[in-house]
Amino acid sequence: MSMPMPTGGPVRLPAQVAGSMSRMQGLLQAAQPEIQSAYAAHWLAARQAAGRPYFQDLSQHMMMGLYGTTALGGLLRYALSGRATPEVVGGIIDQVQLIRQSYEGAQQALERFLEDEEVRSLSGVQLMSRTLPHLDRFYQQMEQPGQAVLNGIEWQPSEEVQGWPVRRAEVGGPARGWQPPLPRWESPGELDRTGDVSELPPPEAEA
């Protein structure tokens, strides 16, 4: 399907930024089976534990993360096909930050959700706990190229996007850095962390 041209003329991306965007695009494509498995397992957990404390909070953050990765994939397609307008580049920065927000929020909600011993005994929750580490690994792989994009483009935050926990990035102005969060999807020790979901390939060294 052809993608319409966004408004504004395209800007020239620094080689390192373009390379990092390409890296993120490749990781997104490779991780689709793991992303789908994680959200499928989340739904099976929801069938058993949707009313338990902190599950709705976890779900909200995960849905926001899914939106972020999906929108990021489309914006990267624009940028890497010669349509890197200031709005598209700003949108990529927005989604990198949105993913970060959702990831950190989901970590905290999952930790609180799994404090309930009865919840941890549910089969759907156990399945989700085995698949989420694969999703965590994907997010960790995305951090280095995401940070390179944030650091490689001059931008500044504008007003908050209504209804979303991010401030719109305006391309131009002082560069902003991003400190990647630590992986904390770990489930309690009694839960088996090995699953049938295929492993993601190890991250390649950045040039």
Image: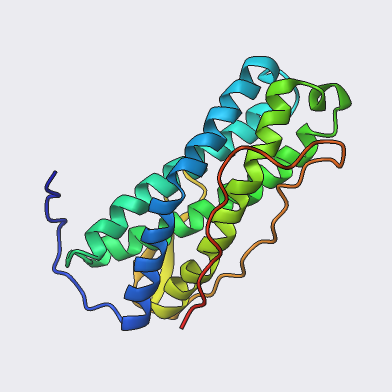
- Judge whether 4 appears above or below 174 on screen: above
Residue 67 x, y percent position in the rendering? 43, 41
Using the image as rendered, state which of residue 90 and residue 37 is in the foreground. Answer: 37
Residue at 56%, 37% in the rendered image: 38
Residue at 59%, 29% in the rendered image: 41
Does residue 122 show up?
A: yes
- Judge whether 107 appears above or below 140 on screen: above
Instruction: Please state if 163 lies on the left or on the right of 91 as rendered.
Output: right
Residue at 36%, 48% in the rendered image: 71
Which colouring convention does the figure follow? rainbow
Q: How many marks?
A: 0
Q: Quadrant of residue 14?
A: bottom left
Instruction: Please state if 168 lies on the left or on the right of 110 as rendered.
Output: left
Residue 89 x, y percent position in the rendering? 31, 65
Quadrant occupied by the N terminus: top left
- Judge whether 132 appears above or below 126 on screen: below
Residue at 56%, 64% in the rendered image: 202
- Judge whether 28 appears above or below 53 on screen: below
Does residue 162 show up?
A: no
Using the image as rendered, state which of residue 37 and residue 1 is in the foreground. Answer: 37
Residue 152 x, y percent position in the rendering? 41, 79
Instruction: Please state if 141 lies on the left or on the right of 194 as rendered.
Output: left
Residue 104 x, y percent position in the rendering? 64, 51
Instruction: Please state if 17 lies on the left or on the right of 11 as rendered.
Output: right
